[in-house]
Amino acid sequence: MDVFLLWHVNTWPDGEEDAKLIGVYSTLELADAARQRAASLPGFRDAPTGFLVDRYTVDQDEWREGFV
């Protein structure tokens, strides 16, 4: 089973990123509908290109090799 995470990522002038998880949805269509709702809200409407949808499979490890 896949789920769809809707994020909004804003990159500040100093290069720092501010990521907000808006929600987790059962379909891509529901994630897109949430994006449309959020796009009119303060802050989000000022950075409309910051939306991102990631698809994840439930019960599956995403970090299998660690990190450095």
Image (spheres, rainbow, N blue to C red):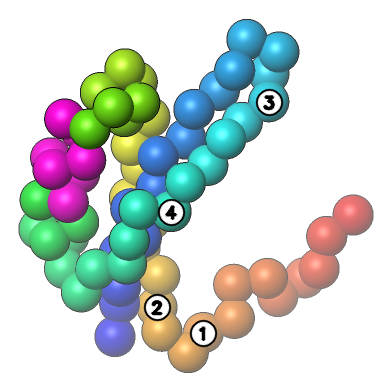
Please tell me which of labels 3 and 2 falls first in the chain: 3
Q: Residue furthest right?
A: 68
Q: Please identify, in this view, whether the residue under mark 4 or under mark 2 is nearer the observer.
A: 4
Residue under label 4, please give it. Answer: 21
Front residue of this view, candidates 65 and 17: 17
Q: Compute the Cα span from label 3 to label 2.
A: 28 Å
- Residues at marks 4 and 3 touching, judged by CB atoms closer than 8 Å: no
Q: Please identify, in this view, whether the residue under mark 3 or under mark 2 is nearer the observer.
A: 3
- Residues at marks 3 and 2 touching, judged by CB atoms closer than 8 Å: no
Please tell me which of labels 4 and 3 falls first in the chain: 3
Residue under label 2, please give it. Answer: 57
Residue under label 3, please give it. Answer: 16
> Disc 4 marks which amino acid?
Leu
Please tell me which of labels 1 and 3 falls first in the chain: 3
Front residue of this view, candidates 58 and 33: 33
Q: Compute the Cα span from label 1 to label 3.
A: 29 Å
Label 4 crowding class (10 Å Cα cut-off): few <14, some 14-19, many 20+?
A: few
Q: Please identify, in this view, whether the residue under mark 4 or under mark 1 is nearer the observer.
A: 4
- Element assignment for label 4: strand
Does the magenta segment cover residue 54?
Answer: no
> Disc 1 marks which amino acid?
Gln
**12 up-or-down from 66: above or below:** above
Q: Give me the residue at 31% from left, 17% from top.
A: 46
Residue 10 in percent (x, y) is at 49, 27
**1 up-or-down from 2: above or below:** below
Residue under label 1, please give it. Answer: 60
Please give the range of residues in magenta.
Answer: 34-40
Can residue 48 be spotted in the picture? Answer: no
Residue 30 location, quadrant: bottom left
Residue 1 in percent (x, y) is at 29, 85
